[in-house]
Amino acid sequence: MMMNQIPQEINPLSVEQSQQFAQLMGTLSPVQQAWISGYLAATANGAVGAMPVAAPAVGAAPLTVLFGSQTGNAKHVAQDLAENAKARGLDVKLVDMADYKPNQLKTEKFIVVVVSTYGEGEPPEPAEKLHSFLTSKKAPKLDGVKVAVLGLGDSSYEFFCQTAIDFEDRFARLGAELVHAHALLDVDYDDHAPGWIVGAVDAFEPALKEQAEPASAPVTFDNAVAAPVSQYNKKNPFQAEISAVQKITGRDSTKDVRHVEISLDGSDLTYQAGDALGVYFHNDPAEVDEVISLLGVDPDAEVTIGDVIKPVRDALIEDLELTQSYPAFVEKYAAATGNAQLADLATDKTALRAYIEERQIFDILRDHPAGVTAQHLADCLRKIQPRRYSIASSQQEVEDEVHLTVGVVSFETFDRPHLGGCSGFLSYRVQEGSTVRVFVEHNNNFRLPDADTPVIMVGPGTGIAPFRSFLQDRDAAGAGGKNWLFFGNPHFTQDFLYQVELQSYLKSGLLTRLSVAFSRNQNRKVYVQDRLIEHGADVFAWLQEGAHFYICGDATRMAKDVHRALVAILKTHGDHSDDSAEAYLQDLRDSKRYQRDVY
Ligand code: NAP
């Protein structure tokens, strides 16, 4: 009923107030009207000053934004989407897939999925449960549910954005309606995500607003998303000073691992044990000069990258990816240079994959130097993406420092040495006092439990990093829970990372047990999972006591083998079948007692 239709004798407002009220109502969306109604109800009940809460809605569903994020990128895009919808007055629920109970799907009407892909087309750790639930017998029919899917990935990898494709396919099979075409975005997703977000929210908005009774609160954010907000982030990194870089593998080691200390002094950056540091790097100026001269480009020629104009030499050092190659580069460079051989190669997907797998972009440019303008060259290249390292220190212990354990990517091919982009930069091209742009990536899916709960940590190679952080944290807090670390690397004498620290933690009792697997110290390879199985009875006893189990390191082989070892332990010591052991481990995951940071 309109205000002017209410009989004056039952309308307590004056004519002027009625007119003002009608004017205001004409500008409000249904959600805003519901909010005001709740607010007035609350104030009338004496709850003055409390947050307004409208009467609970019956039948209205929010826009549920589910994100599955390994490195935080999908989380940030999902947050931007939720903010966009919130600004339009829509009811939004933003949820980390790791915290989402799949049986809630039955209650959903509007779903946006933002998900990344890693490894061989696999879902990121937090998305695994929902990803597999959707193909299980338990998955509900989703007729009438409106869905849109956004994929993030890296086209350097063969199964680009596979997880997003899987999600869309699975939702469609269950009967959901795809209301907005998916986008599968590459590492430069920042340039394209905003456009997709607007289109997707446009597609949901009419149906959300049409709901008979708008939901009570305009937006809810999943608690797990909350993290200290710093002014420094991926888009605005902090210029931090390097305090130390130290090689921590022996002279005769097959591996080169560096312990890097960075000062966060002067920033408001904070981190918790389990978080990661994003690091921007510079390409090697000597290699840049070599390709500039091979290609005959004037190093001072100015190029435009986004809204920045700078000499091409600076752009090639500071802004453009020249190490990690990907198919689109070959296609663009072939077109820009008219190189028939590369154009031909680009038509054969398998041959192109094999070609780029062996080569950095530097190598491709050296293979096919051709006259291009500075701007054409810049247009072929994508922007440098920060590399992510698990943090190896606790702020309780090191205060405004952050420590990393960096495995240097180093190999010889085409008769010349090659280094990884960021690991080469941190290991060979910075010194104490150099600056590096960094930001903290919070990871709520890799966290210590309360102080008394036992933890089992499996971290071979540089996978030790977050466990150094865990141990420092527990040491500083005087936490009483038991700690058991499994560490592995090739040789005892060369590769025992943080040996002195770990042995002193054993001596002090902080480390209850330390089990090491030096794979090449004997004829037969010995890995961390062999040690787990050797101590299977105790591992099982710790799990039964409530221990949390963590894995960090290689995703493709080690993490899968360790999982298999856990299944074997549950079968031997817990009298489980394969299925019940898997169910036991799924329960651990669901209760956040089995967490992995694998890459
Ligand atoms: P790493 O390559 O993971 O090696 C650490 C230790 O793990 C070595 O003793 C190694 O033994 C052993 N290992 C090899 N295969 C294993 C398996 N299936 N299960 C358990 N242990 C195994 O350590 P890192 O060089 O410090 O590398 C750490 C990170 O680099 C990894 O997490 C990963 O991201 C990346 N990486 C990936 C690959 C890959 O192919 N996916 C390969 C190397 C590194 P041996 O070397 O003596 O066999």
Image (cartoon, rainbow, N blue to C red):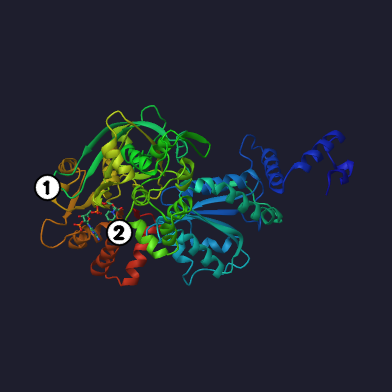
**229 sits to left or right of 421:** right
Is disc 1 placed on a helix, strand or loop?
A: helix
- Give the residue type that dot 2 points to: Ala
Amino acid type, mark 1: Thr
Neighbourhood count class around disc 1 (C-alpha, 10 Å): few under 14, some 14–19, many 20 upward = some
Report if the CB atoms under discs 1 and 2 are less than 8 Å apart. Answer: no
Q: Is residue 446 at all visible to an observer of this figure?
A: no
Q: Position of residue 438 (x, y in %)?
A: 39, 37
Q: Depth check: 347 or 64 in front?
A: 347
Q: Nearer the viewer, residue 225 or 297?
A: 297
Q: Ligand 1 within 8 A of label 2's CB?
A: no
Q: Which residue is mark 2?
A: 559
Give the Cα distance between marks 1 and 2. Answer: 25 Å
Quarter of the picture for ligand 1? Answer: bottom left
Residue 500 placed where, x, y %?
A: 16, 41
> Residue 352: which numbered mark, if any?
none
Which of the 4 image quadrants contains residue 587?
bottom left
Please indicate, yes or no, whether residue 418 appears anywhere in the rendered image. yes
Q: Earlier in the sequence, mark 1 or mark 2?
A: 1
Which dot marks residue 493? 1
Vertical order, 146 against 83 (above or below): below
Q: Secondary structure at mark 2?
A: helix
Q: Nearer the viewer, mark 1 or mark 2?
A: 1
Residue 312 percent location from the top left of the image: 43, 37
Residue at 49% x, 66% y is: 134
